[in-house]
Image (cartoon, grey):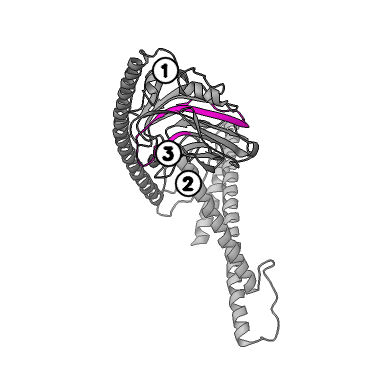
C-alpha cells in the first residue's frame, strides 16, 4: 500500500516537471500532493500568492526569533526543574544518611564505613541538630523582624493583624479608664480646694475685720497720748497668743539695767512680763513669776530669785541691774533696793541679735509660747540701758521726778508691736497717779 502511494507521488512529480520544462517561466510556483485512488486522477495545482524576496526574509526572521524565544523559555524551565530535583535529592540524601546512621548505631557496623557521596551534606546527627538549631534561630530572627515591622507599621498607621489590633484596643481602653479616673480625682480635689479656699477666704475676711477693729481702737486710744512714751500695753487674758514685741534687738552687753512700770493682780503668779531669746538660748534674759514661786531672773538659764511683790493690782516701778563681773545683780521696787546677789551667769556676755517679747516666755526664739506662763496685767515704759544705773537715777524715775529713756531700748509707740485680739495699747495714767500712795 505504501509502495503504491509512493509511486503515484513520483509519477505526478515527473509529469508536472515535463510540462513545466516545456513552458515559459511565468513566475508561478506549483506543488504536488497525494490524492486517494478513488478521487480525481488529475493533478490539481494550488497557486501560491506571489511573494517577493523581502517579505519572505522578514517572515523567516520572525519565525527564527519565535523559535529562539521558545528554546530559551524551555531552557530556563529545565534549569529550574533541575535545581528543584537537586534540592530534593539533597534532602532525600540527608534523610537517608540520618536513617542509616541510626541503624548503624543500633545494629553495629556493616563491615565498611560508608563514604559521604553528597559532598557538604553532613552525616553526623549532631550536625543535623546544629542545622535545625540554626534554622530555628533564623526563624526567630525573622519573627523578631516581623514584630519590629509591626511596631513600625503602628507608628506609620499601617494595618495590623487582628490579634495585635485587639491587644492595642485593650491597652487603649485601660489607659482611657485610668485617664477618666484621674480626671474624676482631679475634679474631687478641685471641689475640695474650692471649699478650702472659701473657708480660708472667710477666715481671712474675719481676720481683716478684727485687724480693722484693732486699728480703730489703737487710733482712738493713741489720739489721747500726750507723748510717744505715755502709753501702756494691756494683756487682760492668760493665753498663748496675746503679747507685745519690741522691734529692736539688743547688742552684746556685759552689763544692763532693765526698768518698767508693772501692774497685775493675777494668781497664781503674774507670768512672764519680759523675755529675751537668742539662737541657741531662748532664756538669755527672762523675768518670770509662775505658781507660788517668787519673781525670778534668768540669765543664760541661770536663776536668781528676786524679793519683789507686785501682785496687788497696783502700779509698781521695778528695776533689775546685772553685770557679768562676778554675776552681780540688784533688784529695786518703787525706787528702793529690795535685794542683791552675785554668781548669776558670771562672766557671760549677753548675746546680740535676739527677740524681745513682752507677756510670753519663749521656748524657741520668738515663739512656742505656753499659756500657763503668760503675763496678765499692764506694762509701761520698759527701757533698757547697757550700764548699771545709779540708785538716784532709779529713784528719780520711780517717784516721777524725771523720765529717762533707755539708750539701748526705749519705750516708744513705734517700737512696740501688739499681737492677739484683746491686746491693746492704751494711754497711760499720769505718773503721780501711778505712785503707791496716790
Q: Residues within 10 Å of mark 2 (few under 14, many from 20)?
A: some
Among numbered discs 3 and 1, the one appearing first in the sequence: 1
Q: Assess whether residue 116 is covered by the magenta stretch.
A: no
Residue 422 picture location, percent across and down: 32, 28
Residue 234 picture location, percent across and down: 36, 27
Q: Which of the 4 image quadrants contains residue 63?
A: top right
Distance CA(mark 3)–CA(mark 1)? 28 Å
Q: Do the residues labelled 3 and 2 touch (CB within 8 Å)?
A: no
The secondary structure type at the circle numbered 3 is: loop
Q: Which of the 4 image quadrants contains residue 196?
A: top left
* Residue that numbered label 1 is attached to: 230
Among numbered discs 3 and 2, the one appearing first in the sequence: 2
Distance CA(mark 2)–CA(mark 1)? 90 Å
Residue 97 picture location, percent across and down: 62, 74
* Residue that numbered label 3 is attached to: 369
Q: Do the residues labelled 2 and 1 touch (CB within 8 Å)?
A: no
Confirm whether residue 248 shows in the render: no
* As drawn, 315 above or below 292: above
* As drawn, 289 above or below 405: below
Residue mark closest to the camera, 2 vs 1:
1
Q: Which of the 4 image quadrants contains residue 371?
A: top left
Q: Nearer the viewer, residue 342 or 215?
A: 342
The secondary structure type at the circle numbered 2 is: helix
Q: Which of 429 and 373 is in front in this view?
A: 429
The range drawn in magenta is 245-274
Amino acid at each position: 500500500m505504501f509502495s503504491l502511494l509512493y509511486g503515484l507521488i513520483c509519477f505526478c512529480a515527473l509529469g508536472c516537471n515535463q510540462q513545466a520544462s516545456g513552458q515559459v517561466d511565468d513566475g508561478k510556483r506549483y506543488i504536488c500532493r497525494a490524492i486517494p485512488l478513488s478521487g480525481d486522477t488529475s493533478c490539481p495545482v494550488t497557486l501560491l500568492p506571489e511573494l517577493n524576496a523581502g517579505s519572505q526574509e522578514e517572515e523567516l526572521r520572525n519565525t527564527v526569533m519565535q523559535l529562539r524565544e521558545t528554546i530559551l523559555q524551555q531552557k530556563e524551565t529545565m534549569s529550574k526543574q533541575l535545581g528543584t530535583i537537586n534540592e530534593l535529592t539533597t534532602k532525600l540524601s540527608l534523610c537517608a544518611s540520618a536513617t542509616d546512621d541510626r541503624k548503624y548505631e543500633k545494629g553495629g557496623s556493616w563491615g565498611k564505613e560508608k563514604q559521604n557521596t553528597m559532598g557538604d551534606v553532613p552525616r553526623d546527627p549532631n550536625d543535623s541538630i546544629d542545622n535545625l538549631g540554626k534554622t530555628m534561630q533564623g526563624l526567630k530572627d525573622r519573627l523578631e523582624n516581623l514584630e519590629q515591622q509591626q511596631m513600625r507599621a503602628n507608628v506609620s498607621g499601617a494595618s495590623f493583624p487582628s490579634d495585635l489590633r485587639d491587644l492595642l484596643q485593650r491597652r487603649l481602653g485601660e489607659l482611657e479608664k485610668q485617664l477618666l479616673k484621674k480626671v474624676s480625682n482631679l475634679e474631687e480635689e478641685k471641689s475640695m480646694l474650692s471649699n478650702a479656699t472659701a473657708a480660708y477666704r472667710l477666715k481671712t475676711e474675719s481676720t481683716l475685720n478684727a485687724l480693722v477693729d484693732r486699728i480703730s481702737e489703737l487710733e482712738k486710744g493713741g489720739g489721747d497720748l500726750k507723748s510717744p512714751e505715755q502709753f501702756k500695753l494691756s494683756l487682760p487674758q492668760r493665753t498663748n497668743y496675746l503679747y507685745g514685741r519690741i522691734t529692736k534687738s539688743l547688742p552684746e552687753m556685759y552689763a544692763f539695767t532693765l526698768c518698767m512700770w508693772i501692774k497685775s493682780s493675777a494668781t497664781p503668779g503674774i507670768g512672764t512680763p519680759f523675755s529675751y531669746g537668742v539662737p541657741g538660748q531662748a532664756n538669755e534674759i527672762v523675768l518670770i513669776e509662775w505658781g507660788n514661786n517668787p519673781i525670778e531672773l534668768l540669765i543664760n538659764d541661770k536663776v536668781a530669785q528676786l524679793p519683789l511683790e507686785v501682785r496687788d493690782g497696783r502700779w509698781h516701778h521695778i528695776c533689775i541691774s546685772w553685770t557679768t563681773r562676778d554675776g552681780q545683780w540688784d533688784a529695786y521696787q518703787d525706787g528702793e533696793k529690795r535685794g542683791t546677789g552675785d554668781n548669776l551667769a558670771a562672766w557671760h556676755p549677753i548675746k546680740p541679735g535676739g527677740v524681745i517679747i513682752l507677756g510670753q516666755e519663749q521656748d524657741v526664739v520668738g515663739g512656742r509660747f505656753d499659756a500657763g506662763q503668760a503675763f496678765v496685767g499692764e506694762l509701761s515704759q520698759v527701757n533698757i540701758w547697757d550700764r548699771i544705773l545709779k540708785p538716784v537715777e532709779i529713784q528719780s524715775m520711780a517717784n516721777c521726778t524725771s523720765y529717762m529713756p533707755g539708750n539701748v531700748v526705749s519705750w516708744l509707740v513705734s517700737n512696740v508691736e501688739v499681737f492677739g485680739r484683746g491686746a491693746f495699747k492704751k494711754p497711760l495714767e499720769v505718773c503721780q497717779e501711778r505712785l503707791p500712795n496716790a
